[in-house]
């Protein structure tokens, strides 16, 4: 996980290809302090990437219908400078990178700069599409791959018009091949082109501020900083002068800014263009079309008949099958289980974790990977698969947050889930970290999380953000036996998780019909209505969920990884008929996420397999406490539609 940012100043940004009738504001060289300063951005980024912080500037000089660049690590003044012949407008690109290093054997400091003058800041993980050795650092490997790309903006119109003859990838072609979450900014010096973007599902945050008359800079950042100290940021003040629309989530995709010679006013021109994904496999996933949506009566009866058979399958039986090359035919639930297991493996053990053991930590008590844990269906599956994937000597931290002590539904299910995991894997040391919080005592924390959820601004986003932020911090209580004797008493001791990787169940509900609105759509529009609603959820998950979740978790120097949003898992689920994924004629806890309930049974998680869906804001009871604090009661909150109510900052 890293924090990355780019500040573009002194350049007239042309957005006409993205926003029709857009009028480009002229670059401003004001001495007034902007809403967000470079130091504000650095501070926010370093919370995401505490291992290192780096910066590199590129100055851009227009010379006789060409643009020349100069690398610099100092803070030259932007704007207009005297060059001996008159006024010359100078553009500046400021790259800032803060690193939480999780790959490789040697320290890496961003931005990365190669011998050709290219500059890269990268926040992501490469799980396929570009070859990496187990001990490689993916940022360094990506830099080498991008250096080999041609200088063409795209091969889309005519591949062989490229000077390389089309034998080398363009930047969009290379990025389209990457499997895994990413966001990046890249300066390609040979073409004087700036590239930026985020993966097709938006699994890594990247915010953008497009130039406005009030702030003509182009800004990109993993996270919105808290405003400078002189700026108002009053939670209760409707007259606060914070511009809530300063940032927006960058739409998923690859973008370029092609720099050109000055216009008649003397300003450098940067023309922004969005590029299509080129990989056919990825484009199929984005369109999210399922081949079998509408079942025949015999399909439903056959599907329901299989459930009773699959309930009898056990983890040991599947384990013996996985050890054999003659696994035919596989059931749909077995296919999903195998894909999920490979997804967890890719995210935990296939690549060496940088500094796997902290210097000040004893090896016999270390958990390199944690699970955001409610004890519900999704987190139980992830925890059981993580047990299968990581070395037996490692402990596994299960992070559970509650705003109602032992009474919160998620605390109750987490403790029950811990018992079931211990029953299935008694030799593993499971650490259920109980993180207790009181919303009334979180004034400072609430203001911080409000900046993290930006540009989201509803109470629902704030409640989810607070719960995620506190859970990811991993600072809570652990129940430990006071002796090794059977029936020993337990005591609660303070415990803080040092795991830098946090597995999260995002994407399971969207793909497997886990939301209440899916049942409503099914009742109103049958199978096609359900499919369209699930498709809509997947195509907007980057905007509604993932950017916010990434920012709130990463603020604790933890990296969220999403096994259910692995490209191969998405493909497997799309290949399964919809009525095998869910049967919403069946009651809650049975028909919703039916395929995952079958997977849970294969893992021996029979109790978890019947649990109903419960969102984190309700399971942790932060929504109830928030409604009481802000609306007086749950009933008043419901009347005010609190979930979509906008926070006044």
Image (cartoon, rainbow, N blue to C red):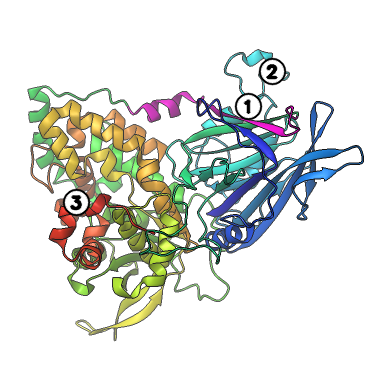
Locate the C terminus by quadrant. bottom left
**Label 1 belongs to which residue?**
170
Q: At 58% across and 61% down in the image, what residue appears?
A: 40
Check disc 3 and report its element: helix, strand or loop: loop
Indicate the position of residue 354 as horizontal and vertical percent values: 57, 59
Is residue 268 shown in magenta? Answer: yes
**Count of residue discs:** 3
How crowded pointer 2 is (Cα within 10 Å; few <14, some 14-19, many 20+) is rated as some
Q: In the drawing, what numbered circle is on residue 339?
A: none
Pick whichever of labels 3 and 1 is earlier in the sequence: 1
- Rendered location of residue 158, percent (x, y): 61, 13
Are the two marked residues, 1 and 2, in contact with CB atoms closer than 8 angstroms? yes
Sooner in the amino-acid sequence: mark 2 or mark 3: 2
Q: Is residue 394 in view from this perspective?
A: no
Residue at image position (57%, 36%) is 130
From the viewer's perspective, tell me whether residue 14 is left or right of residue 573: right
- Mark 1: few, some, or many residues within 10 Å (few <14, many ≥20)? many
Query: Relative to 302, does residue 236 appear above or below in the rendering?
Result: below
Q: Farthest right residue?
A: 84
547 or 288: nearer the viewer = 547
- Magenta segment: 262-288
SS for callout 1: loop
Q: Residue at x 7, y 24 (%)?
A: 297
Secondary structure type for disc 2 = loop
Report if residue 320 is visible in the image.
yes
| Of 557 and 85, the residue lying toward us | 85
Q: Could you tell me residue 98's position as x and y percent?
A: 60, 57
Among the 4 quarters of the image, the one containing residue 291: top left
Q: For mark 2, what is the residue?
A: 162
Pointer 3: what residue? 613
CA–CA distance in space, label 2 to label 3: 52 Å
């Amino acid at each position: 996980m890293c924090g990355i940012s780019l500040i573009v100043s002194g350049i007239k940004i042309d957005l006409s290809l993205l926003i029709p009738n857009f009028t480009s504001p002229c670059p401003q060289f004001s001495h007034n302090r902007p809403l967000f300063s470079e130091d504000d951005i650095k501070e926010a980024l370093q919370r995401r990437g505490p291992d290192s912080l780096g910066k590199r500037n590129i100055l851009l000089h227009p010379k006789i219908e060409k643009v020349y660049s100069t690398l610099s690590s100092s803070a030259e003044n932007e704007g207009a400078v005297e060059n001996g012949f008159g006024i010359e407008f100078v553009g500046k690109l400021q790259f800032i990178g803060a690193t939480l290093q999780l790959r490789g054997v040697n320290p890496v400091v961003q931005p990365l700069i190669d011998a050709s003058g290219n500059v890269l800041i990268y926040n992501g993980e490469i799980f396929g599409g570009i070859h990496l050795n187990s001990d490689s650092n993916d940022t360094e490997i990506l830099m080498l791959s991008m250096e080999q790309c041609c200088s063409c903006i795209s091969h889309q119109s005519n591949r062989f018009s490229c000077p390389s003859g089309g034998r080398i990838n363009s930047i969009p072609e290379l990025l389209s091949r990457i499997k895994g979450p990413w966001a990046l900014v890249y300066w390609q010096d040979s073409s004087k082109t700036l590239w930026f973007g985020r993966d097709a599902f938006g699994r890594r945050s990247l915010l953008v501020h497009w130039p406005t008359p009030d702030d003509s800079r182009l800004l990109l950042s993993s996270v919105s900083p808290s405003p400078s100290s002189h700026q108002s940021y009053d939670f209760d003040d409707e007259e606060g002068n914070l511009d809530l629309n300063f940032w927006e989530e960058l739409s998923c995709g690859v973008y370029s800014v092609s720099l050109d010679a000055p216009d008649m006013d003397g300003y450098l021109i940067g023309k922004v263009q969005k590029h299509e994904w080129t990989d056919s496999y990825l484009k199929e996933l984005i369109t999210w079309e399922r081949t079998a949506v509408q079942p025949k009566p015999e399909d439903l009866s056959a599907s329901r008949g299989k459930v009773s058979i699959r309930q009898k399958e056990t983890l040991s039986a599947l384990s013996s099958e996985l050890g054999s090359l003659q696994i035919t035919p596989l059931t749909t639930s077995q296919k999903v289980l195998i894909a999920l297991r490979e997804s967890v493996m890719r995210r935990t053990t296939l690549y060496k974790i940088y500094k796997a053991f902290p210097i000040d930590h004893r090896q016999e008590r270390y958990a390199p990977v944690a699970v955001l844990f409610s004890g519900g269906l999704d987190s139980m599956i992830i925890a059981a698969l993580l047990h299968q994937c990581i070395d037996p000597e490692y402990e596994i931290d299960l992070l559970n947050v509650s705003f109602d002590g032992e009474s919160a539904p998620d605390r109750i299910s987490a403790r029950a889930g811990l018992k079931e995991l211990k029953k299935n894997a008694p030799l593993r040391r499971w650490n259920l970290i109980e993180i207790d919080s009181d919303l009334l005592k979180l004034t400072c924390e609430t203001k911080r999380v409000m900046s993290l959820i930006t540009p989201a601004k509803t109470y629902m986003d704030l409640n989810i953000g607070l719960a995620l932020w506190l859970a990811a911090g991993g600072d809570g209580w652990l129940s430990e036996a006071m002796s090794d004797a059977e029936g020993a008493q337990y005591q609660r001791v303070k415990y803080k998780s040092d795991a830098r990787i946090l597995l999260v169940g995002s994407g399971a509900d969207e793909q497997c019909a886990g939301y209440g609105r899916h049942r409503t759509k099914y009742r109103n529009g049958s199978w096609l209505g359900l499919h369209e609603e699930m498709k809509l959820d997947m195509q907007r998950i980057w905007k509604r969920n993932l950017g916010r979740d990434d920012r709130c978790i990463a603020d604790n120097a933890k990296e969220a990884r999403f096994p259910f949003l692995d490209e191969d898992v998405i493909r497997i689920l799309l290949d399964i008929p919809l009525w095998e994924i869910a049967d919403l004629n069946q009651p809650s806890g049975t028909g919703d996420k039916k395929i995952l309930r079958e997977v849970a049974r294969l893992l021996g998680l029979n109790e978890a397999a019947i649990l109903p869906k419960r969102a984190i804001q309700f399971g942790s009871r932060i929504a109830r406490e928030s409604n009481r604090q802000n609306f007086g009661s749950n009933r008043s909150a419901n009347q005010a539609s609190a979930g979509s109510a906008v926070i006044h900052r």
